[in-house]
Amino acid sequence: MSIPNHTLQVELRGGVEDRSYPIVIGRGLLADLGAFVPALDDVPVVLVTNDTVAPLYLPRVRAALGTERKVTEIILPDGEDQKDLTTASHIWQRALEDRHERRSMFMALGGGVVGDLTGFAAACFLRGARFIQLPTTLLAQVDSSVGGKTGVNHAMGKNLIGAFHQPEAVLIDLDTLESLPDREFAAGMAEVVKYGCICDPQFFDWLIEHTDALRGRDGAVVADAIARSCAIKAEVVAKDEREGGLRAILNYGHTFGHAIEQVMGYGNWLHGEAVACGMMIATRISASRGWVPDALVERLSDFLDAFGLPVAPPSEMSAQTFLDAMALDKKVDEGRIRYVLLDRLGRATLVNDVSCEEIAEAIA
């Protein structure tokens, strides 16, 4: 099936320069990078990927870059455990050894781990190098590749060390989803349905109606879901680039989800799996406060369950376990944990008064 390219714009015009950039969604984009990346020209490239993605997509990216360009290939082991300062230092070491300059373009070819790492490395390299995102997982395509959040994990918590550093372009090649395992695809759907919960009730209803088509990876339906997810995130980021207020709603399910990832060990639960569970906890608390109907809890649970995503937390995690882990979250403000709840479908709100008893009830 031929799916036409679709281009969105992340509008970031504050400050002294226009930092807006395109999100291009379509097929065959990796093989034609030069047509979509502004000012790629003949600049040197630091190309970061991992040993799962490299055999699948590195050859077509290298071919698109040409044989005359200086390209430093960095192929990392796959896994969340690579998202740390040690790996970032390895990227810097390779870039410095090959005498890259600030004009060099860092490219992230992979999922969220590769994207976050590469963006963070670019943000710090010579106080700020250019980079683009080439996301190959559904989760990265609809979430982590858009918005300029970069960073690494720390033993004390997820994404505690990082920087806001916007890419110059995001190219979402739908062909990469063909090789994506079912578990990874499902993890991405957690981030997709999040956007309906917090911003767009019609999109939420549409996702429910198209559950079977999404599970079957219908190309046109998946492309529409990605485009709408990216459009919502681009709109939120344009209004609040550095998470001073509105952008925090994008963390719906993440405060609880990050706690699960930390306690259970990074990589044992996929990020999207933890977010799915975190959204269920947040939605149950919202319902217990009378803000959303119990029917919404059931609809969300049924949707997530259709993709095999967890809707209940690990049995070994108590309410106090969650609180202890969340106390180290980067979203803590003046010692109080900020939670994202729903005051109705399609509208999220920030609160800091969720009690241990409410959490205990929601995870029971």
Image: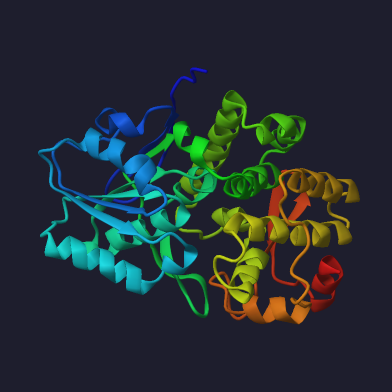
The answer to whether residue 12 shows anywhere in this view is: no
Q: Is residue 195 left or right of residue 314?
A: left
User: Residue 254: x and y, percent?
Assistant: 62, 61
Q: Is residue 86 above or below residue 168?
A: below
The answer to whether residue 311 shows anywhere in this view is: yes
Foreground: 343 or 294? 294
Q: Is residue 178 left or right of residue 99?
A: right
Quadrant in which the C terminus is drawn: bottom right
User: Residue 287: x and y, percent?
Assistant: 85, 56
Q: Look at 45% across and 51% down and name the residue there.
A: 111
Q: Look at 71% across and 52% down and name the residue there.
A: 309
User: Residue 318: x and y, percent?
Assistant: 77, 78
Foreground: 215 or 335? 215
Foreground: 200 or 246? 200
Q: Is residue 253 above or below residue 71?
A: below
User: Residue 208: x and y, percent?
Assistant: 76, 35
Counting labels gives 0
Q: Is residue 162 left or right of residue 314?
A: left
Q: Is residue 133 left or right of residue 187?
A: left
Q: Look at 27% across and 57% down and name the residue there.
A: 74
Q: Look at 28% across and 33% down and name the residue there.
A: 33
Q: Is residue 129 above or below residue 41?
A: below
| Rendering quarter of residue 181 | top right
Foreground: 92 or 362? 92
